[in-house]
Amino acid sequence: MMSAMPRSWGLVKLGDLTLPVERKDPRSLFGDTFHYIDISAVGNVSKRVVGDTALKVDEAPSRARQVVYPGDVLVSTVRPGLNAVATVPAHLTDTIASTGFCVLRPRSDMLLPSYLFHFVTTDPFAQVLVSRQKGGAYPAVTDDDVRSVSIPLPPLGEQQRIVEILQEAEEIRRLRAEAEAKTAELIPAMFFQSFGDEADRFQNRPLRELVYEFRYGTSQSSGDTGATTLRIPNILGDRISFDDLVNVNESEESVERLQLKTGDMLFVRTNGNPEYIGRCCVFDEEDAVRETGPGRPVIFASYLIRARLRSNHIRPWFLHAYLRSPLGRARVLKQARTAAGQYNINIEGLGAIQVPVPPIDLQDRFLLAATEAQQIREFVRRSGAQMAALSRTLFARAFSGQLTAAWRDSYQELLAHEAQDRDAALKQAGATISRLRRPTMQDEIDAMLRDRTDGIYSELNREQRLLLREIQRMAGGVPYARYFSAQQLSDYLREGPLHRNPQAVEGHLAVLAARGLVVPVSREEQTEDTGEFVFGNAYRLPLDDYEPREGEEGEPRVGDHARLRELERLAAQLEKERALP
């Protein structure tokens, strides 16, 4: 539902609220050294400048050209979906930033640096940039793309109040993160306390003697249906994550063979990062049911190895803790191999790892302590997830005026004067301010789509434009194809007549497919009633760098003749619909 922005607010483009930034060769400015902030120096999670930024002048790279000062806000224009943003900290002087950043230096009479910083950390800001990015393997936006984003602009006094509230929430979030990091180390600490550096005083045996079955996972590709499948991103080291799961179509026999059971251990067997090799987790069916629902088998992908242990010799949680210890980790990496930049450990390598085997009662005592620690860890993690959800809500309210509504009512006269001063400053700077009925930045994406009235966009209705936006949010922003169905899209929509209405969504997708805005990609099949050949109605977005849309330079490459026939059929169907009275 749309809600009015406060009267004292407005929407202004960032470019109208920021100052130009000087570009210089650091050799002409500094003596021996300077501080250099490149893309890698900004943490996309911490939103801070991290690491040692000192650099010798004669080692300055060609991209070290933007002169920045404390308070400047840096927005990475490379891979904008990562939202790598930061404020130049107060202790950094004599600093140059990479040209891979858009540097936003706010005008002090209109915009607080801290308010601007919190704004550019929001998901809607990142999504607007993702919708504007160009490039496949190296997606990026321009400085103009960043500066053309509009920011809700309250008077300075209310900006300060919003910042104070958000900073309090940030401090709570920081403490939560510290607590989660500490609980993640509980089990390794317990292992050290129980066994210390003398784990090797127990008999050592190769892992193959402690495992009655090793197995590689499925190599089938993912689809819309099938068995829930764990992949490398789901193996976090201390636990299994059930986020971003995929489905894989496997035969009943294969699913039965690959289905995971409580106590199974999963190992990462190949990756470009050696830190991932041999990373392992213990599977628990209760966790899986809680996260994915009952009656759904969970299997694992080919880049993982499952080990089923001889439980009368070794317990899963003991082995997991040992392999995370420095000694265990060193023994894992000793068995790893590398080729063509990829690290790998196979079943033979895993089986050769030497493992100390304490008496089973000692392992069980450790298991009890580890279970309690894991429960604490899970509680803290879930609490952190709830905090993250509340934080997103808080930010949405902050930049729509709802967060400070009561405070604003108490300071109406002061804010009115500040708003007049701000508007005068904007007028002097030649900027324009608009007061739209807009609760969040998502309307900017709507506006962007509404502006496209040329060519293939000319006759789209409101619902079709909504679907285009939501498809971009759900499946866009990456240089490779993400597949989706009408059912998935209707479930993804949060509200409105298309929510959980796959039939209506399917009809709109047919129109979008006829215009080349989405591409039908599922297998061709024959209908039972008419015998007509149609598609199974799965779709993807066109890959902009490789598939020009209809009406643009080049021919749309939809993959094969069958897909082209489907597009022609949909286009003919659309023409018939237009001809109806």
Image (tube, grey):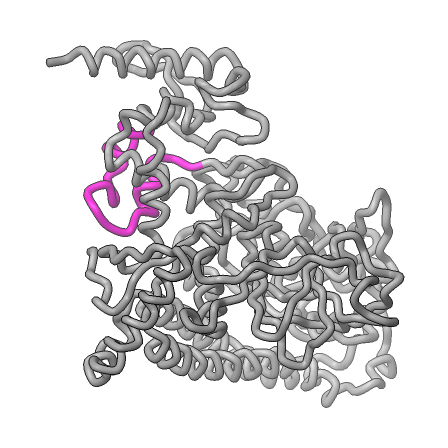
Residue beneath the point at 63% across and 80% down: 90
Q: Residue furthest bottom?
A: 193
Left or right relative to 444: residue 544: right
- Please identify the quarter of the rendering in which residue 276 is found: bottom right
Report whether residue 384 is seen.
yes
Left or right relative to 500: residue 332: right
**Of residues 555 and 97, the one drawn nearer to the viewer in this rendering:** 97
- Magenta-highlighted residues: 484-509
The quarter in which the N terminus is drawn is bottom left
Instruction: Please provide percent x and percent y for residue 165.
Output: 38, 81
Count of numbered tags: 0
Instruction: Please provide percent x and percent y for residue 324.
Output: 73, 72
Residue beneath the point at 48% across and 74% down: 114
Q: Residue furthest front?
A: 428
- Vertical arrangement, residue 558 with respect to residue 437, above or below: above
Instruction: Please provide percent x and percent y for residue 371.
Output: 56, 79
Magenta segment includes 497: yes
Report whether residue 293 is seen.
no
**Of residues 263 and 470, the one drawn nearer to the viewer in this rendering:** 470
- Vertical arrangement, residue 223 with respect to residue 16, above or below: above
**Of residues 465 and 162, the one drawn nearer to the viewer in this rendering:** 162
Left or right relative to 296: residue 406: left
- Vertical arrangement, residue 328 with respect to residue 410, above or below: above
- Please identify the quarter of the rendering in which residue 397 is found: bottom left
Residue beneath the point at 27% across and 27% down: 507
Residue beneath the point at 86% across and 77% down: 203
Magenta segment includes 557: no
**Of residues 67 and 378, the one drawn nearer to the viewer in this rendering:** 67
Instruction: Please provide percent x and percent y for residue 405.
Output: 23, 76
The quarter in which the C terminus is drawn is top left
Q: Residue furthest left?
A: 581
- Vertical arrangement, residue 389 with respect to residue 581, above or below: below
